[in-house]
Amino acid sequence: MTEAIIRELVSDLVALPESDRLTNPYAPPDDPPATIRRQNLERYLEAMGQFSPHILLLAEAPGYRGCRLTGIPVTSERIMLNGIGKWQLFGTGYQPTSGNPAGVAEVTATILWRALSDHLNGPPLIWNTLPLHPHKPGNPQSNRTPTTAELTIGIPFISRVLELYDISLILGVGRKAQLVLTRMGLEHIPLRHPSQGGKAAFIEGLIQAVL
């Protein structure tokens, strides 16, 4: 049952509209790289079932070196291909879309997964507030902060993801995620975003949140 729900959720991501400022990593449905990213996301969400995650870590949006290529929130190709040894997560079966056999790395993803592996007993479920990649107009190889209006696009998907597992703790990474969680009336613990000098504060907040 959960697998069918996951496939439907991922399939519905395809319908989210693009613009010169937003790219949908999961569309169009007949695009081979987009198909791979959908398969990667489905595989990740299904694999999380074995961990029965009780923590949702809600990030902001896909980055052009991370989820934009893998389809998996805050996860670079390098991490996805090498896997997280502590939990035997990722690795075999996941595919890159960049054309780089070793996979592309992303700083935020590296910081986040290292901190999670160091300080948590099991992996949290990770999701993006906005499933689309926000970038500078006409330049998909860039990142920008999503607008408040754009963030509302992802609210229905946050609700659906929360129904997949028995989530009892929500961590909002960055102000945009925290804003949306507050608007949804969901209790959460705010964490500093690990980018732009926020690594130490993010790790400290993570440790305090899971004590």
Image (cartoon, rainbow, N blue to C red):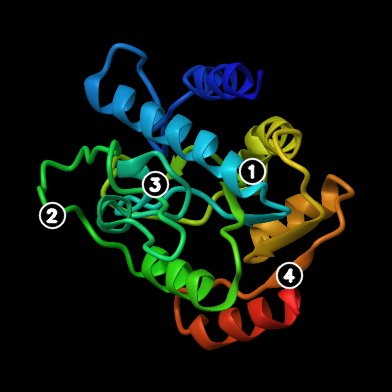
| Element class at badge 3 | helix
Task: Tell me the number on the disc at residue 102.
Answer: 2
| Location of mark 1 (residue) | 151
The quarter of the image holding the N terminus is top right
Contact? badges 3 and 4 (CB < 8 Å): no
| Element class at badge 4 | strand
| Location of mark 4 (residue) | 190
User: Rounded to the nearest whole Å, what is the CA distance between mark 4 and mark 1?
Assistant: 17 Å
User: Rounded to the nearest whole Å, what is the CA distance between mark 3 and mark 4?
Assistant: 22 Å
Q: Nearer the viewer, mark 4 or mark 2?
A: 2
Which residue is found at the position 38% from the left and 22% from the top?
27
- Give the mark nearer the N terminus: 3 vs 1: 3
| Element class at badge 2 | loop
Name which residue type carries label 4. Pro
Q: Nearer the viewer, residue 117 or 142?
A: 117
Which residue is found at the position 11% from the left and 41% from the top?
99
Contact? badges 4 and 2 (CB < 8 Å): no
- Give the mark nearer the N terminus: 1 vs 2: 2
- Give the mark nearer the N terminus: 4 vs 2: 2
Name which residue type carries label 1. Leu
- Give the mark nearer the N terminus: 3 vs 4: 3
Q: Nearer the viewer, residue 90 or 59?
A: 90
| Location of mark 3 (residue) | 67
User: Rounded to the nearest whole Å, what is the CA distance between mark 3 and mark 1?
Assistant: 16 Å
Q: Dot 3 surroundings within 10 Å: few (below 14), some, or many (20 or more)?
A: many
| Element class at badge 1 | helix
